[in-house]
Amino acid sequence: MYYGFDITYIFVIIGMLITLIASWRMKATFAKYERVASQSRLTGREVAERILRANGIYDVSVRPVSGRLTDHYDPRDKTVSLSEVIYGSTSVAAIAVAAHECGHAIQDNVGYVPLNLRSAFVPVANWGSRLSWPIICIGFLLGYGNMSNILIQIGIAMFLLAVIFQIITLPVEFDASRRALIELENNEILFDREDKSARKVLFAAAMTYVAAAATGVLQMLRLMLLFSGRSRRRN
């Protein structure tokens, strides 16, 4: 504490700024290239199907999903889900996003280890993100006893699991974008300078994952500092 202000809130503020900047850049970049029609005139669905077939992947289906930029690949049911603004759009942005999700399908097909690790980590990370803060809050409410410290340690450990998941996600996302750009070139889906535009869209999207991981690490550091200070006051 410094003149009544918790100095560790600086970590929270920095994390918020990083997240806001990354989110703004992603939305601005996508909005820009969402208005640029590709020369191939292929829709997001057609691009996804072409890339999957070119890689000999026939057990993955492409389907529309509600929402905006809710695109994802689910290795459990072998499905590339494309949002409304991607599935039927012929824009450069839509093509880049569709190719990225196919990049995940390719990762799954070749047994890309970081993707398998992330998939296995999902349930653990979900429990960690849901229960960490309630457990930490209960620990604080109990005062300075041993049970309080144990609960706080458990809460911080569970929060760490969620942070680890965000870090594991980074190589998976960057590799999917790398594969997407290769597929767009090999299958002659983009022309002239369109590949540079697609690269900008994918990079902006990747930065949102970097921001999420950085924010998680900062919050983890804040919790560790708060807990260490609490332990010193108890002693």
Image (cartoon, helix red, strand yellow):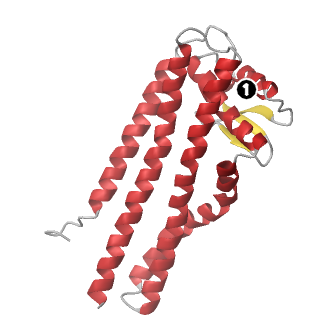
Residue 224 location, quadrant: bottom left
Quarter the C terminus occupies: bottom left
Quarter of the figure with residue 19: top left
Q: Measured from the top left, where is residue 202 in percent x and y? A: 53, 30
Q: Position of residue 57 (x, y in %)?
A: 82, 33
Lateral position of residue 122 relative to residue 136, left or right? right
Name the outermost residue toward the left: 3
Q: Residue furthest right?
A: 58
* Residue 85 can be seen, yes or no: no
Residue 191 seen in the figure = yes
Residue 102, placed above or below residue 162? above
Q: Mark 1: few, some, or many residues within 10 Å (few <14, many ≥20)?
A: many
Q: Could you say where residue 20 lies in the image, as x and y percent from the top left?
A: 38, 42
For the point 60% across and 11% down, which residue is it? 38
Residue at 27 percent across and 58 percent down: it is 10
Residue at figure coordinates x 71%, y 17% from the top left: 187
Q: Amino acid at mark 1?
A: Ala
Give the vertical position of 106 relative to 200 (above or below): below
Position of residue 33 measured from the top left corner of the image (x, y, whole percent):
51, 19
Pick the front one: 184 or 134 = 184
Q: Quadrant of the N terminus?
A: bottom left
Return the residue at label 1.
48
Position of 94 relative to 37 (above/below): below
Query: Callout 1: helix, strand or loop?
Result: helix
Whether 159 is drawn above or below 109: the answer is: below
